Amino acid sequence: GGGGGGGGGGGGGGGRLPHGLVAAAIGPYGASVEGESEYSGRYGRRLGAPALAAWHAWRVDVLLSAGADVLAFETVPCVTEVVALCTLLQSRPAARAWLSLACRSAAELQSGERLADAVDAIEQYDVSGQVEAIGVNCAAPLLASPLLRAIRARSPRPLVAYPNSGEVWDEWAHGWVAVGPDGAPSAESAAAGAERFGRLARQWAADGAVLIGGCCRTRPDHIAAVARELRAAEEEGRHRHGTTLLRP
C-alpha cells in the first residue's frame, strides 16, 4: 500500500496493544493516479463506492494473505472512499483495520467534505466494528489535536494520530522548509522541530490517541522524541495519580 506512510511511534492512553503488531498500509485510490488527486479526493463521487471497493479489494486480500495483523487505511481524502473501505471489510469479517483521514482543516477532509460526515459514515457502514480506530495522518502537527477532538465528538472508538513534520515545500528554494504556528517560514532547526513534534504528541495522547507516530518528512529523531515524551508523561502520571499511560 502507499499514500503517506510514516514511522511508528508509541501508544497513548486508553488501550493496550500487543507487542509486534504488524500493520499493512493501504493508501487512497488517488495516490495511484496522476494529478495529485489524493490531495483533493475529487474522484470519490465520480467513481462511486462500489468501484473504489473493487479497486482496493486485491490489495486488501494480498496483504491479509501475507499475515498482516491490521490494515492501515490511511490518507483517505473523501467520504465515498470511507464508505468503500468499510463496505469492503464487511465481506472479510476476520479483517481488522484503522482508518486515518486526510484533512485540509480542523473540520474538512481534503475533498472539502465535512470531517463529521466521514466519521458518521464509519459508524454507519462499519456494522461489525472492524474499524478499531479512527484518526488522522499527514496533517500538520498543529492540526492533529483539533482533528482528534472533532473525531471524538462523533465516535467513541480509539484514536490514531501520525501527522507529517509540518514542513512545506518552497518552490523557489526547491526544498522543504520549517514553518511556525502562523504558517510563516521559520528558522527552527530540524532537531528543534523534532522535539516540538514530541511535545505535541503528549497532547495527542491526552486527546485520546492510542497509536501515535509520524508521516511524511518525519524522521527517526521525531519518533524518538515522541517516545521520550510519552515515557515522561507516563512517569509524571504515576507520581500524580498512581496511574499509567499504556504503551504497546
Image (cartoon, rainbow, N blue to C red):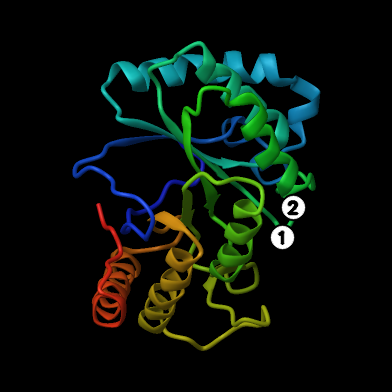
Relative to 13, 131 lies left or right: right
Asked if residue 158 can be seen in this view, the reply is yes
x, y (%) of residue 76?
A: 60, 39
Task: Determine whether 21 is above or below 162 in the image.
Answer: above
Relative to 214, 111 lies left or right: right
Q: Do the residues labelled 2 and 1 touch (CB within 8 Å)?
A: yes
Instruction: Name the residue at 73% across, 47% down.
Output: 116
Figure quadrant of residue 29: top right
Asked if residue 1 can be seen in this view, the reply is no
x, y (%) of residue 130?
A: 47, 27
* Residue corresponding to mark 1: 105
Dot 2: within a 10 Å radius of its alpha carbon, few (fewer than 14), some, or many (20 or more) residues? many
Which quadrant does the N terminus fall into?
top left
Q: Is mark 1 on a helix, strand or loop?
A: loop
Which residue occupies the foreground of this view, 223 or 11? 11
x, y (%) of residue 204?
A: 47, 65
Task: Determine whether 2 is above or below 248 in the image.
Answer: above
The amino acid type, in three-letter code, at marker 2 is: Glu
